[in-house]
Image: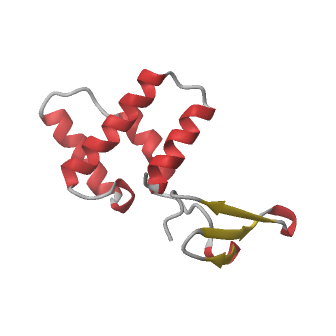
Amino acid sequence: MSLLRYRMQRDMERAGLAPRTMEEYIRAVRDLAKFHRRSPDLLEPDDIRAWDEDLLRRKIKSSNHVLKYLGRYTHRVGIANSRLVNVTETAVTFRTRGDKTGTLLGPYCDV
């Protein structure tokens, strides 16, 4: 599972979205990746607009709700480089507030 998908699923679960709603968001992201033949986190805003325009051209319901949701994940920095303490193949350690540290472990750790 990619880091983007892991974060998306975790946040949807925390927000209490219904299973069907989560499936629709994931399907939309999969369609977006298929349309551009690359991962959604590598897309630029113009790429996402092109996908939305294609949906409108084909008279498919607008993807605005999905675009707003995706924007939270594809156009922001998850952890700033200045906060990184250590990066290995299995973990990323970073500074949090108050100079504490946090560590991400597991298969979603794409380093």
Q: List x then y, in percent, for residue 41.
A: 39, 58
Q: Nearer the viewer, residue 4 or 104?
A: 104
Q: List x then y, in percent, for residue 85.
A: 71, 77
Q: List x then y, in percent, for residue 42.
A: 35, 62
- Is 49 placed above or below 22 here? below
Q: Determine whether, in the image, residue 34 is placed left or right of residue 44.
A: left
Q: List x then y, in percent, for residue 88.
A: 59, 76
Quarter of the image holding residue 62?
top left
At x 36%, y 35%, the residue is 64
Q: Nearer the viewer, residue 33 or 48?
A: 33
Colouring rule applied to residues: secondary structure
Q: Looking at this rendering, what residue extends furthest in the left direction?
A: 58
At x 82%, y 62%, the residue is 97
At x 85%, y 69%, the residue is 99
- Is 105 placed above or below 62 here? below
Q: Determine whether, in the image, residue 66 is placed left or right of residue 33.
A: right
Q: Determine whether, in the image, residue 103 is placed left or right of residue 39.
A: right
Q: Looking at this rendering, what residue extends furthest in the right direction?
A: 98
- Is 86 placed above or below 29 here? below
